[in-house]
Image: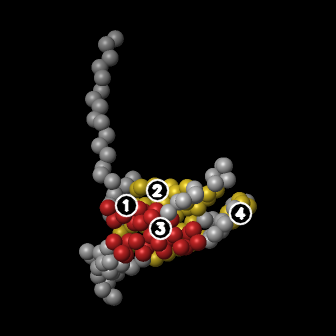
Amino acid sequence: MRRCTGQSITLPMPFRILSFLSEIENALQSEAPAHTLGPWSNGRIINYQSGLARLSLGVKADATAPLRPLGSILLQAFDLADHSFCLKANISWTEKDAGSEIVHAIYDKPGVDWVGEARQIAAKWLAGPPAEKFEDAQEPIAVAG
């Protein structure tokens, strides 16, 4: 059973963070075994108490080359007001503007396909950031007065 205790959250299954992060990483590596810039070199940071995990994605051209960061996927697990569970993924790329991020929310409903959701997140990251949004150029309107 999930419950919120102060600032830490008790999840029913710790698998949701670590295992789901692994599923995303496996999906990335199966879709793109090697990046065009070199082999994958990923890092993970997980905080079970706060329900946060981060997969930092990068490549290394060779063993002596510096790591080239490409982006990250941040997972946040939390309870909703109706006591249902939600896992949110924030997908971002380092070479693009900070505004080029995608949020993918997964709600724990009967029949949710966690592996399929992990593959969707990996596919979204591999597809790259969304096309830039063009704001409507509005010219000042003259007010008769």
Left or right of 142? Residue 11 is right
Left or right of 61? Residue 28 is right
- Residue 110 at what x, y percent from top left? 58, 57
Mark 1–mark 2 contact, CB under 8 Å?
A: yes
- Asked if 107 appears above or below 139 in the picture, the reply is below
* Residue at the disc numbered 2: 104
Q: CA distance from mark 4 to mark 1?
A: 31 Å
Q: Which mark is residue 124?
A: 1
**Disc 4 or disc 1, which is closer to the eye?**
4
In terms of sequence position, does the residue under pointer 3 or pointer 2 come before the other? 2
Q: Amino acid at mark 3?
A: Val
Mark 2–mark 4 contact, CB under 8 Å?
A: no
Residue at 31% in and 84% down: 65
Q: CA distance from mark 2 to mark 4?
A: 24 Å
Q: Which mark is residue 27?
A: none
Q: Which mark is residue 1?
A: 4
In terms of sequence position, does the residue under pointer 1 or pointer 2 come before the other? 2
Please tell me how crowded label 2 is: few (under 14), some (14-19), or many (20+) other residues with Cα within 10 Å. some
* Residue at the disc numbered 3: 115
In terms of sequence position, does the residue under pointer 3 or pointer 4 come before the other? 4
Please tell me how crowded label 4 is: few (under 14), some (14-19), or many (20+) other residues with Cα within 10 Å. few
**Disc 2 or disc 4, which is closer to the eye?**
4
Residue 108's quadrant in the figure?
Answer: bottom right
